[in-house]
Image (tube, rainbow, N blue to C red):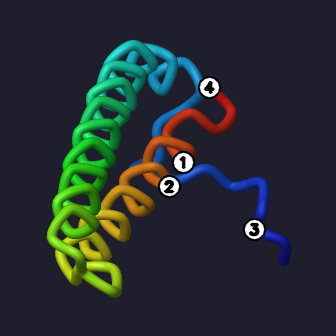
Amino acid sequence: MDNSSETYDNEPDDHSVEQYAERVSDVANQLQSVSEHLNDLAMDVLRSAVEAGAGKRPELEKKLSAARRAVDKAVRTLERDS
């Protein structure tokens, strides 16, 4: 038997999902702001490293950039089909 069209009690219907759209959008906007802050901080770390004559990317900058990419992915996920 094909259960793909079944709905479950714990799944919101389209109407109830719509009522959360503004809140989801607000979270996506906040995450976008976090992404921008992470990027600014990563650039500051890189700038300082260059000024200090570092020959490679600082580990902190790598962590900040990875965190920014993860946040950007979360933003894309929340904005998809909205």
Observer-side mark, 2 or 1, equals: 2
Q: In this view, does 16 lie to the left or right of 66?
A: right
CB within 8 Å, label 2 to label 1: yes
Mark 4 or mark 1: name the one nearer the start of the chain. 1
Q: How far apart are marks 4 and 1 (CA)?
A: 10 Å
Q: To which residue does mark 2 refer?
A: 73
Tell me how far mark 2 sits from mark 3, CA to CA.
31 Å
Residue hosting label 1 = 77
Tell me, for residue 3, which label it has, or none. Answer: 3
Between discs 3 and 1, the one toward the N terminus: 3
Task: Residue 82: give its label.
Answer: 4
**SS under mark 2:** helix
Tell whether label 3 touches label 2 (CB within 8 Å). no
**At 48% from the left edge and 26% from the top edge, which residue is drawn?**
17
Of the numbered discs 2 and 3, the one sitting upstream in the chain is 3
Asked if labels 1 and 4 touch by Cβ distance under 8 angstroms, the answer is no
In this view, 4 is above or below 78: below
The correct choice, above or below, for 31 with respect to 23 in the image is below
Q: Is mark 3 on a helix, strand or loop?
A: loop
